[in-house]
Amino acid sequence: MGELWSRTYQTVYGMIYDPKLILVCGLDNAGKTCLLNRLQGIERNTVPTLGFNAETLQLGYATVQVFDTCGQQTRRDSWSMFFHHAHALVYVVDSNDIERIYEAGTELQKILNHENFPDVPVLILANKQDHPRAATPAQVMRGMRLQRETRPWRVAGTVVKTGEGIDEPLKWLVDQMWQTRT
């Protein structure tokens, strides 16, 4: 009985006081900073991120640190400095930018295949679903040419700007983080 209480205490304590890191990556103009702002309850115009933005947030029952990274091609190598600390990855894709979906897939594969990237849950947000010519989440996956992963992963269609479609996938991600805690 004491062991059960000890494990329960450690789990609850960890959810509140030991925030896990969620790394947010994707190409430039995909909606990464907009997602971070939405999670903070802030509505503002965004400018391209040059380094990274970091915030500690409450997502459901868990406290998490969210690192929003720069998506510009010349700065994508900087993503790897966060890999070792990541407990989950949110990869944001601009579903309306059909010409760059394959590039988005190539960059995601680089992350997943990187020697320092841990075996953590991956959530792919097929963002900007409100645009008339936006690719569906299934089309985004085909266009990215991703291999089936052994790690937990999921694709969700979203409109980050309005918050449409983000709550349930993020709940899934947090649940996965705590089930596969490292």
Image (tube, helix red, strand yellow):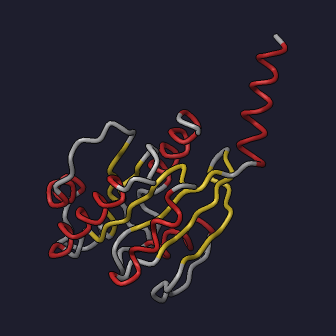
The answer to which of 111 and 6 lies nearer the viewer is: 111
Q: Position of residue 166 (x, y in %)?
A: 45, 57
The answer to which of 5 and 76 lies nearer the viewer is: 76
Asked if residue 73 is positioned above or below residue 150 in the image, the reply reads: below
Q: Position of residue 120 (x, y in %)?
A: 46, 45
**Farthest residue in the top direction?**
1
In the image, taking residue 1 as reference, residue 172 lies left or right, namely left
In the image, taking residue 76 as reference, residue 104 lies left or right, namely left
User: Residue 54, located in which quarter of the rendered image?
Assistant: bottom right
Write the residue at 57% across / 79% down: 43
Q: Position of residue 64 (x, y in %)?
A: 64, 55
Asked if residue 114 is positioned above or below residue 179 in the image, the reply reads: below
The answer to which of 167 and 52 lies nearer the viewer is: 52
Write the residue at 15% across / 76% down: 99
In the image, taking residue 16 as reference, residue 133 lies left or right, namely left
**Farthest residue in the front direction?**
115
Q: Position of residue 156 (x, y in %)?
A: 34, 53
Number of labelled discs?
A: 0
Which quarter of the rendered picture does the N terminus lie within?
top right
**Farthest residue in the right direction?**
2
Which quarter of the rendered picture does the C terminus lie within?
top right
In the image, taking residue 74 as reference, residue 106 lies left or right, namely left
User: Residue 134, located in which quarter of the rendered image?
Assistant: bottom left
Write the residue at 37% across / 61% down: 158
